[in-house]
Image (spheres, rainbow, N blue to C red):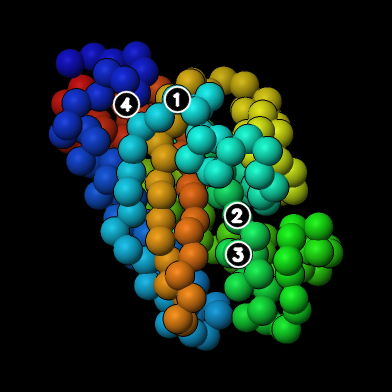
Amino acid sequence: MGFNNLNDLDAMHLDVLREIGNIGSGNAATSLSSMLNTPVEIEVPNISLINYDHVSQYLGGKDRKVIGLALGLEADIEGVMLHVVQPKFASRIINAFYPKEIQALEDINEMDLSAVKETSNITTAAYVNSMATMTDTFINITPPIEYLDTVENVLKRASDRFDAIGHQVIYIDENLYIGDTEIKSSMILILQIDSLKKLFDKLGIPY
């Protein structure tokens, strides 16, 4: 079976992507727990294919304020991973380093954003490294670019930076437990079609 976009993938291909997501989430939990020096658990993530234009509906609406951190993927696999951080997630991460009351993202300063950014680097890198290990590929991660804006603007600016991407994306919806706090986290993996084909080829999955 050949495919030209993610809508053409069958159940077997989706299972492979889910497995990569499952392994990535487990590694992300381990890395995050070590960084924060507190237990971190991640439920088996819900992984689905959605149109990029519809992502805002999964993130609380286009006008919701969030932090978006976009990392480019280069070398054997090309694309982008966008981590969308909600206010509750940011507050929990910042307070793992120092106490600060955060009611809204407007309360976050540069030092706070740096803590969130470093945490996001670790979790997204865990996903990318899992994908590279499973597929025996080399994936270079570019420095992240952060956006503190509405969901609509974060998604637009991320897609503007990577204008070669398609409309379908892999949406990874996570529930994390950091200590006794439940937090939702969202990862958006955008792969170019040629890179996706290479991924399946490396795994011996026909396409």
Alpha-carbon span between mark 2 and mark 4: 29 Å
Closer to the chain start, of discs 3 and 1, is: 1
Q: Residue at x 48, y 20 (%)?
A: 166
The quadrant of the rendering that contains the N terminus is: top left
Closer to the chain start, of discs 3 and 4, is: 3
Amino acid type of the residue tagged 2 in the rendering: Val
Q: Residues within 10 Å of mark 4 (few under 14, many from 20)?
A: some
Alpha-carbon span between mark 1 and mark 2: 20 Å
Alpha-carbon span between mark 1 and mark 4: 19 Å
Residue corresponding to mark 4: 197
- Please, is residue 97 above or below residue 176 in the view? below
Label 2 close to label 4 by CB (< 8 Å): no
Q: Residue at x 29, y 59 (%)?
A: 44
Residue corresponding to mark 3: 88
Disc 3 element: helix
Q: Residues within 10 Å of mark 2 (few under 14, many from 20)?
A: many
